[in-house]
Image (cartoon, coloured by chain):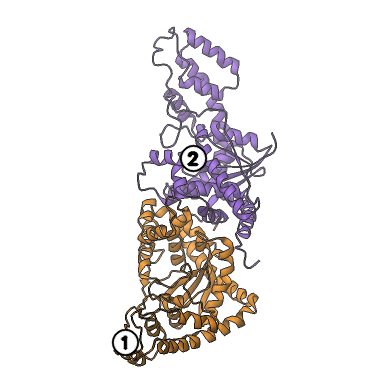
Chain colours: A purple, B orange
Amino acid sequence: MTSHIILTGDRTTGPLHLGHFVGSLQNRLAFQDKHTQFLMLADAQALTDTDHDVVHRNVLEVALDYLAVGLDPAKNTIFIQSQVPELSELTYYFMNLVTVARLERNPTVKEEIRQKNFQRDIPAGFLAYPVSQAADITAFKATAVPVGADQAPMIEQTNEIVRRFNALAGKDVLLETRAIIPQTGRLPGPDGKAKMSKSQGNALHLSASPDEITQFVKSMYTDSKHLKINDPGQVAGNAVFTFLDAFEPDISFVDDLKAKYRKGGLADSVIKQHLEVRLQELIAPIRNRRLELAKDPAHVMQILKAGTARARTVAAATLGEVKSALELDYFS
Amino acid sequence: MTSHIILTGDRTTGPLHLGHFVGSLQNRLAFQDKHTQFLMLADAQALTDTDHDVVHRNVLEVALDYLAVGLDPAKNTIFIQSQVPELSELTYYFMNLVTVARLERNPTVKEEIRQKNFQRDIPAGFLAYPVSQAADITAFKATAVPVGADQAPMIEQTNEIVRRFNALAGKDVLLETRAIIPQTGRLPGPDGKAKMSKSQGNALHLSASPDEITQFVKSMYTDSKHLKINDPGQVAGNAVFTFLDAFEPDISFVDDLKAKYRKGGLADSVIKQHLEVRLQELIAPIRNRRLELAKDPAHVMQILKAGTARARTVAAATLGEVKSALELDYFS
């Protein structure tokens, strides 16, 4: 794999959870040694549908999660979106390159509008957020963007804007990007069905206490027909096995457990105990580092300040090229 | 009249003409001694529907028009919109305060979409330009904005955003504004009907040569039934009288002319000659100052640079208050 410039990040609407760990943080940890990675705390984007006090508070929370899992500020540029004003300026100009009808057709936006129940009261900022994303991606000349499969249309939207801009400029000012779609499926909540998410209230945070982990595992669904230990049990759709697949590195051990469970004779309490050990082991060092880091929030903000300054330098260079191509450079 | 902070300006899509002089420049000349006036060269807004090379070129042209008619850079803050990035940042955040449906209902935008024949292909930036205007107006805490009667809904849109923002902030960060709707009607082209405009190709520029003025007056419609000098003539809808009303300060002289014309015995050539004298007198000093100023475009750009710096200071202060109210001030 060639070296990429990657833009990724999270809306700062809540602390991160195990679903983020499996779906994105693990990949970022792998990427940070091979690629140039920009990690964006997307507070401005979060404001399109979340109250500002929630958004503000969670900038620090998400930053703590990043640092606690081992994302290294020396290897990554961790920055706060709203503190890079070049991104809103790019958004402003890109808005002329996309029609309202095209934004309304965007399948990701359509689905989110349905989920959020906006009906006709879609905030203009929400409809325009693919344009804002295009600004974020192109500002850093990102060559790859890790996204869920359902977010792939956003990348296509970005590339349309890139092509329109470059055609307008008469030269390749902006770079097309590509989606990195993770191999791992989405982690469900304890019922094994709905995906883990803050809004579903089924998330196990990366800062979970030992007791919260225990309670979470206890609440997990297994096979509702597996009433007696000696009954054969179902593995498919069994949340505990879904989690073991995600968190138990010893695959043949999990395969053995599955075989025994299918055959009958393996208690739910046993597989849950295995899982709990793994989760306690996984989360303990993250929680501890997080508690340590949380003692000095000013230090974390200092890291974000430095990252934001680096991000601004890159974004300002791109904005300069964009404004120069639009002949908006009167005083230089 | 109490002293106002006024924001006004022009999209930089072409040099200004007599219609602008009557409709806005004259008012600005009166305002500059009584009010704090921000004059915006709206290049960014012009980009929503005009090619960037046209927009770029006309920044200087419009600035020359401003200075040539006597708008004084010591009394006004003359600035280039795109060089005040705070305005796009404000636009970005205000986008969350207005729904797509509300923007689509805006009567001014609706009419312009019809005129420009955008159909379904409305650029997102065009639909959002009332939000951008709200950013411009509130950035300078403008208490008054001179607009045509058809633009009054834009002011209402701004005030809606102001009220929503202040409610969100829990305090009055932004100021509501009010429209100043000029008393004078819109100046028509030489046919006395269609309003004078660049797009209609019926405009007499403020830089018109003596010969262009002569030709313009020659081409003017009078009363198509006034075939013989001694026939009674119509004054209403007679473009020459419309112009005399606008440009001949001696009202009783015009009243006498009208009476004679109605009675019969006054040749079209005579009233045209009066008008031509007035227009030559009006335009000659503007044209001469303009030619003089155009010899040193660097000096004009220096004026715009200084004005833009002043405008940025004001806009940055407002943006700071806005971002602080949204708790987007992590590093201060």
SS of the residue under disc 1: loop
Q: Reply above or below: A210 against B237.
A: above
Task: From the viewer's side, name the closer residue of B5 and A149.
Answer: A149
Residue B246: % across, % down: 39, 83
Q: Reply above or below: A240 against B216.
A: above
Q: Which residue is drawn at 55% across and 25% down?
A: A247
Q: Mark 1 lies on which chain?
A: B
On screen, residue B255 versus residue A198, left or right, reads: left
Residue B45: % across, % down: 50, 62
Q: Does residue B37 appear in this view? A: yes
On screen, residue B265 versus residue A125, left or right, reads: left
The N terminus of chain A, quarter of image: top right
Q: Residue B231 carries which label?
A: 1
Residue B322: % across, % down: 46, 60
Task: From the viewer's side, name the closer residue of B269 and B302.
Answer: B269
Q: Does residue B248 appear in this view? A: no
Instruction: Give the amino acid at mark 2.
Output: Pro
The C terminus of chain A, quarter of image: bottom right
SS of the residue under disc 2: loop
Instruction: Give the amino acid at mark 1.
Output: Asp
**Mark 1–mark 2 distance (CA, rounded to whole Å):** 86 Å
Q: How crowded is mark 1: few (under 14 residues within 10 Å), some or many (20 or more)?
A: some
Residue B231: % across, % down: 31, 87
Q: How crowded is mark 2: few (under 14 residues within 10 Å), some or many (20 or more)?
A: many
Q: Which mark is residue A15?
A: 2
Q: Reply above or below: B1 against A216.
A: below
